[in-house]
């Protein structure tokens, strides 16, 4: 699974190694994530089936995210950690796209992005001071108002903002 998620590479007749982290790979992940998730968000917003249930789920997840301390940022395996609730928020945004393959791809891109965040956050103090809750709240409000264009724009800005905190090995 780690190979299929591009987290591990197989080296012929030598074994395996963790995939290289580079600026070029991160830029590709970010660009692809923006394409895939902005499309999936639009599809989710256009899907009228169980719309109220989806909106309620987003509201609840956002509430939990706001109430969870970001000190749990580096506890990704704890289901009640900020990171896992954050992941659930983003995956719920795209959950109604109508394509399980697209949802799976978005989750793989999220995990790739998370790997870079853990490896390469340039200034952890400034990153922790960033008010991500406001960014999430703004995305959620645009979704609830069914303003697809604004929701997509805010999601893209959110991802680019995260990318601006990363630095890369020389």
Image: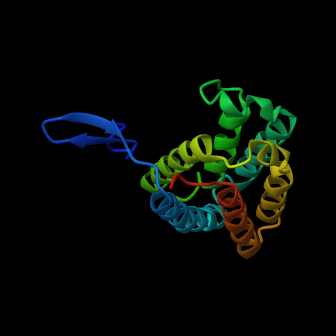
Hey, which residue is sitting farthest front in the picture? 170
Q: Give the colour scheme of this rendering.
A: rainbow
Hey, which residue is sitting farthest left in the picture? 13
When asked about the image quadrant of residue 163, the answer is bottom right
Return the x and y of residue 19 as percentages of the image width and height.
38, 44
Return the x and y of residue 109 as percentages of the image width and height.
50, 52
Q: Residue at x 67, y 67 (%)?
A: 156
Nearest the viewer among 155 and 95 is: 155
Q: How many marks?
A: 0
Return the x and y of residue 8 as percentages of the image width and height.
35, 40
Nearest the viewer among 108 and 127 is: 127
Residue 19 vertical position relative to residue 97 in the rendered view, above or below: above
Hey, which residue is sitting farthest bottom in the picture? 149
Q: Residue at x 66, y 54 (%)?
A: 93
**In the image, is 147 to the left or to the right of 14?**
right
- Point out the image quarter for the N terminus: top left
Nearest the viewer among 123 and 159 is: 123
When asked about the image quadrant of residue 152, the answer is bottom right
Q: Residue at x 17, y 35 (%)?
A: 14
Return the x and y of residue 64 as percentages of the image width and height.
81, 36
Nearest the viewer among 81 and 64 is: 81
């Amino acid at each position: 699974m780690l190979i299929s998620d591009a987290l591990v590479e197989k080296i012929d007749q030598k074994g395996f190694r963790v995939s290289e982290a580079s600026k070029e790979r991160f830029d590709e992940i970010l660009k692809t994530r923006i394409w895939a998730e902005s499309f999936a968000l639009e599809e989710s917003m256009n899907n009228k089936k169980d719309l109220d249930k989806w909106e309620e789920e987003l509201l609840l997840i956002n509430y939990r995210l706001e109430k969870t301390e970001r000190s749990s940022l580096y506890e990704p395996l704890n289901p009640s950690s900020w990171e896992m609730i954050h992941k659930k928020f983003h995956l719920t945004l795209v959950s109604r796209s109508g394509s399980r393959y697209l949802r799976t791809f978005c989750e793989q891109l999220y995990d790739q992005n998370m790997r870079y965040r853990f490896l390469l956050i340039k200034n952890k103090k400034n990153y922790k001071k960033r008010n991500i809750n406001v960014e999430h709240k703004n995305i959620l409000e645009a979704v609830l108002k069914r303003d697809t264009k604004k929701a997509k724009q805010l999601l893209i800005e959110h991802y680019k903002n995260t990318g601006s905190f990363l630095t890369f090995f020389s």
